[in-house]
């Protein structure tokens, strides 16, 4: 092959450019590449105490330091800011019809906002080493929007978007927040209990939303294997609340954390919520359908 090294570099084929170099130059280039890769790994490691990986410029930009793709992904996955929408107004539209059009557009954007936490959970998986003395924040779930050239923020009308649709969106938002925890992090019972006490005193008046987010947080910790430190007494305290999302999160999270452990007590707890594993003579247990596995 008689292509120049610069030609391979121009089309982005660094591998062929490396093969086309002289042996000594290849050796020096490979050593420099290894040093750069090692420096990048050292720089991209999130230090203990970093609780918001989306705002960490080092974590986002070191691996893609030649463009803004990482910042763009973080911006697209953010659900804590009002969305910006544009709704053109037709000349024959009345004020009432125009407001209805904006609410319809805002309701469509709310469905998209509800799905962002799935991508955020994958994007920030295992990126945080939280300190034992600090809470892991759950990003806000904002369904309001702006309609330029108006600068004000317009809230979503409940008649266009039922509040019941936000239950699992808040739940998944909590799961995404917990998935940020690295598997090497030592999670204690007190740290989990601290998050529970914080969720029982939400900043807003809607305690149900906060409970759903905390339930998702428990499931996320279970998927990361961090619920092994939770004693049985605490698990029963969660189940006694008879909160659907919390009960489902505790059962699934404990099962995921104790995978292959053959824990007899946990097996009995799960069997109560699995109708197919109950004997035929067993009396019916009042367990809601979403909690039944």
Image (cartoon, rainbow, N blue to C red):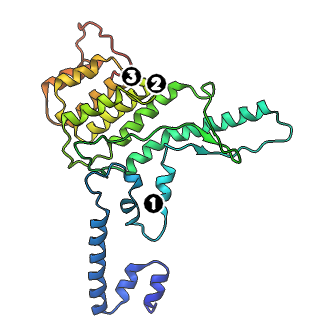
Residue at 60% of width from left, 26% of height from top? 158
Q: Are marks 2 and 1 in contact (CB under 8 Å)?
A: no
Q: Which mark is residue 290?
A: 3
Q: Quadrant of the C terminus?
A: top left
Q: Which mark is residue 97?
A: none
**Label 3: element kind:** loop
Place of residue 74 in the rendered image (x, y in percent of width and height, measured from the top left): 46, 53
**Label 1: element kind:** helix
Quadrant of the image occupied by residue 2: bottom left
- State the CA–CA distance, disc 2 to disc 1: 35 Å
Place of residue 219 in the rendered image (x, y in percent of width and height, measured from the top left): 31, 34
Residue neighbourhood size for the residue with mark 3, other residues' Cα within 10 Å, grouped as few (<14), some (14–19), many (≥20): few
Place of residue 287 in the rendered image (x, y in percent of width and height, measured from the top left): 33, 15
Who comes first in sequence, dot 2 or dot 1?
1
Q: Nearer the viewer, mark 2 or mark 3?
A: 2
Relative to 232, is 9 above or below?
Answer: below
Quadrant of the image occupied by residue 226: top left
Who comes first in sequence, dot 1 or dot 3?
1
**Which of these two is toward me, 266 or 64?**
64
Q: Quadrant of the N terminus?
A: bottom left
Pointer 1 residue = 70
Who comes first in sequence, dot 2 or dot 3?
2
Q: Is 46 left or right of 162, judged from the image as shown? A: left
Pointer 2 residue = 205
């Amino acid at each position: 092959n008689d292509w120049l090294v610069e030609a391979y570099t121009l089309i982005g084929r660094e591998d062929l450019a490396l093969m086309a170099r002289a042996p000594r130059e290849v050796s020096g280039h490979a050593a420099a590449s290894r040093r750069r890769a090692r420096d990048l790994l050292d720089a991209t490691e999130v230090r203990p105490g970093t609780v918001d990986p989306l705002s960490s410029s080092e974590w986002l930009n070191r691996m893609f330091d030649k463009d803004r793709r990482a910042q763009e992904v973080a911006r697209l996955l953010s659900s804590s800011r009002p969305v910006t929408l544009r709704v053109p107004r037709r000349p024959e539209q009345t004020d009432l019809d125009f407001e209805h059009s904006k609410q319809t557009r805002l309701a469509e954007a709310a469905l998209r906002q509800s799905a962002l936490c799935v991508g955020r959970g994958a994007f920030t998986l295992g990126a945080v080493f939280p300190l034992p003395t600090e809470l892991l924040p759950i990003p806000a779930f904002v369904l309001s929007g702006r309609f330029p050239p108006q600068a004000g923020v317009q809230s979503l009308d409940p008649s266009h978007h039922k509040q019941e649709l936000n239950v699992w969106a808040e739940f998944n938002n909590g799961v995404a927040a917990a998935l940020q925890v690295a598997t090497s992090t030592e999670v204690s019972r007190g740290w989990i209990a601290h998050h529970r006490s914080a969720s029982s005193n939400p900043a807003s008046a809607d305690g149900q939303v906060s409970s759903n987010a905390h339930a998702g947080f428990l499931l996320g910790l279970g998927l990361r294997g961090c619920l092994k430190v939770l004693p049985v007494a605490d698990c029963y305290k969660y189940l006694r609340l008879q909160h659907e999302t919390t009960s489902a999160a505790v059962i699934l999270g404990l099962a995921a954390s104790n995978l292959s452990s053959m824990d007899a007590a946990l097996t009995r707890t799960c069997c109560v919520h699995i109708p197919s594993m109950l004997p035929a003579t067993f009396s019916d247990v009042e367990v809601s359908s979403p909690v039944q596995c």
